[in-house]
Amino acid sequence: MNLLIKDRASGKTTGLIYTSEATQYPIVTFNRMSINYIKEKAKDMGCLIPEPLCIADLKSNSAMGRILPDNVLLDEAGGIIGDALKAYLRTNIVAATMTDSLREHYDRMKKAE
């Protein structure tokens, strides 16, 4: 998993929309309001993306038996990952660390130049 870490309102979702258009991987977000925002933003950008998904849709009974995509892009991953880990581990995660493997790759490439 690669991380795109930036400040609020600095282009994270915009980057995911471009990635979604290029890969045709759907964007998964926390709620319906975010789905509407992503769809409007993609439309304004002229990007054709797969229908965004929300966690509630994936967890609902209507999703049972439905074929889910092999790959997805996660918008605002912190909340989604926190909730998933809380359900999986049955405890609240207060802080976590993670290595940005994509950034490590680019850093190695720069050093090799």
Image (tube, grey):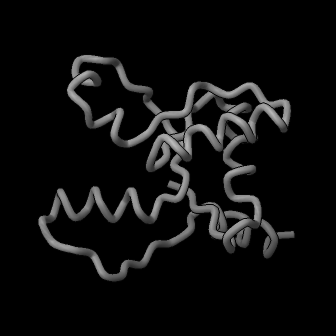
Q: Residue furthest left?
A: 90
Residue at image point 33% right, 40% down? 56
Looking at this view, is 81 or 42 the one in front? 42
| Residue 87: percent from left, percent from top | 18, 58
Which quadrant would the C terminus be assigned to in this image? bottom right
Numbered circles on residues, count = 0
Task: Judge from the rendering whether residue 79 lies leftward or rightward of residue 63; answer left or right.
Answer: right
| Residue 103: percent from left, percent from top | 66, 67
| Residue 110: percent from left, percent from top | 81, 71
Q: Residue furthest bottom?
A: 95
The quarter of the displayed image where residue 98 is located: bottom left
| Residue 55: percent from left, percent from top | 37, 42
* Above-or-below relation of 77 to 98: above
Q: Residue furthest front?
A: 33
Residue at image point 66% right, 31% down? 23
* Above-or-below relation of 97 to 72: below
* Above-or-below relation of 96 to 104: below
Residue at image point 47% right, 34% down? 53
The quarter of the displayed image where residue 10 is located: bottom right
The quarter of the displayed image where residue 97 is located: bottom left
Task: Judge from the rendering whether residue 107 lies leftward or rightward of residue 51; answer left or right.
Answer: right
